[in-house]
Amino acid sequence: MPIKRTILKNDKSIFIVKLNLDANDFIAEHSSSAIVTATVTSGLGIFNVGGIENKICQGSFIFMNPDEKHSIQAFESLELIVHHINISHKVSIEAGHICGMTKN
């Protein structure tokens, strides 16, 4: 079965995608020009970053610099939330206002 990709957000500054891999699925080595973070929400696998294999499970967090090569191997069903943060676009947040919340 193909790897399921669900786009959660896509704009100039950030691309967020949920990846669902079945057991034994593999995403070949690739890189991104953005800063990339990945959080594992369920499952087990290997996340290779720059030639270093990192065992991953629920709660694992991976950070990658721009152009850092990485790949993913699922041992069992694996779900990740991946953020691609484009630092070439400035994002300003008014002090005290995040997600519509105001600072008291």
Image (tube, grey):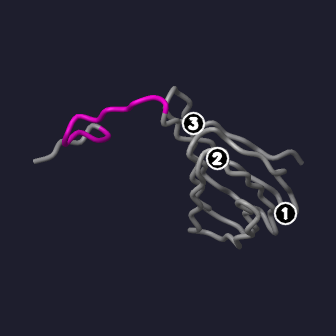
**84 versus 23 height, above or below:** above
Q: What is the three-letter code of the residue carrying label 3?
A: Phe
- Measure the C-alpha gap from mark 1 to mark 2: 16 Å
Foreground residue among 89 and 18: 89
Taking the spot 76% from the left edge, 64% from the top edge, the residue there is 51
Query: Quarter-wise, where is residue 95 in the image?
Result: top left
Residue sitting farthest toward the top: 12
Per the image, label 3 sits on a secondary structure element best described as strand
Per the image, label 1 sits on a secondary structure element best described as loop
The residue at which mark 1 appears reads as 23
Query: Quarter-wise, where is residue 97 in the image?
Result: top left
Residue sitting farthest toward the left: 104
Taking the spot 72% from the left edge, 63% from the top edge, the residue there is 47
Foreground residue among 22 and 72: 72
Q: What is the three-letter code of the residue carrying label 1?
A: Ala
- Bounds of the magenta span? 88-99
- Residue 33 has which mark? none
- Residue 15 has which mark? 3
Q: What is the three-letter code of the residue carrying label 2?
A: Lys
Q: Nearer the viewer, mark 2 or mark 3?
A: 3
Per the image, label 2 sits on a secondary structure element best described as strand
The residue at which mark 2 appears reads as 18
N-terminal-most mark, 1 or 3: 3
- Measure the C-alpha gap from mark 1 to mark 3: 25 Å
Q: Name the side, left or right, on which 81 lies relative to 24.
A: left
Question: Where is residue 77 shown, x and y percent of the image?
Answer: 77, 62
Foreground residue among 48 and 5: 48
